[in-house]
Amino acid sequence: MDDTAKMSEKPLVSFALFAFNQQEFIGEAIIGALSQTYQPLEIILSDDCSNDNTFAIMKDMAEAYDGPHRLVLRQNKKNVGVAEHVNRVIDLASGELLIVAAGDDISHEDRVSAAVEAFTDDDRLAVLETGYAEIDDLGNATGRIHSYSDVQFDLASYLAKSERRPVGASRTYRTETLRLFPHLSPDCPTEDTTLMLRCLFAGEGRAVSKASIQRRIHDNNLSARKRLAVMPLEPLRDQYLADAKYALHKGMIDSEAFKLATDWARTEFCLRKSFQWLWQGENAFAIARKVTFMQAPWNAKARAYWRLTRGMARSGASE
């Protein structure tokens, strides 16, 4: 990244809390946001037209707040879905960094200050991912801590280790980098891998082991298996391919990186589709036959077969 990516000495940061039908959890999530020790901080409380009491709770807590942070309370007039919700918040954010938080997770009070420190040290950094501790739907610690080796990564090294599933819940993005790209397609079902790839087309990423959030695990998570089993994957694949083409056109990546990214996108599609069929009860032979006839390179199919076989073996071992 060039010198235009240099941050201010004490940058304004936007902390965006995304909510939809999370009345049981939103209060704790807001407390985590308001407890941040870093200043100057803009906190965006954004609701995607919930049909429960989520927004009422957000409104009450925002009106009662008298602390140092700037609060922005907003609600979409109709439910627009994950991608369009993210688009609107990116457009609204005033900060040089954008920290994202889900309405069912709890951020540690030093989350923002730790992120600023990481970005201040490296002008190439476009995205930061941290560890997290799991809690259940009642807020009890499950004892599972997810941490990464402290490592810097680029597009090639990230895609080479794509068996590690991305977790958007603990991310911080450089806002300027996100705005290099057009809006996500409204029918794109998720934002985590798409925004990660966009950042790696334009810069580098970093993973740190220290947990910055308590991530709540429950049946209504966007990443819960029952949701992943029915997620529309074609729009996600098409978003990956469109973003790679855009990055190539704008000179962010070369033809070699473009091929790497598009091959990965097709492999990822094969793999996700295979697991959907597996979760829906199809047998291995039927899945293999479907993968064979997918419109994807042979190496993408082979890699999908391999990863699916590993996944089935692990699933069988754990049962």
Image (spheres, rainbow, N blue to C red):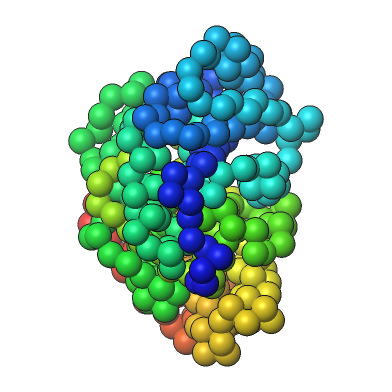
Q: Between 165 and 232, which is closer to the camera in this rendering?
A: 165
Residue sitting farthest toward the left = 143
Q: Is residue 72 visible?
A: yes
Q: Between 291 and 94, which is closer to the camera in this rendering?
A: 94
Q: Is residue 140 above or below residue 267?
A: above
Location of residue 305 (image quadrant): bottom left
* Percent x, y of residue 297: 55, 86
Residue at (25% x, 52% y) in the render: 209
* Percent x, y of residue 89: 65, 42
* Percent x, y of residue 251: 63, 82
* Percent x, y of residue 160: 37, 76
Residue at (71% x, 62% y) in the render: 182
31 vs 44, left or right, is left
Residue sitting farthest toward the front = 9
Tally the marks.
0
Residue at (51% x, 68% y) in the render: 3
Q: Is residue 132 above or below residue 233?
A: above
78 vs 266, left or right, is right
Residue at (38% x, 63% y) in the render: 122
Q: Is residue 293 visible?
A: no
Q: Between 54 and 201, which is closer to the camera in this rendering?
A: 201
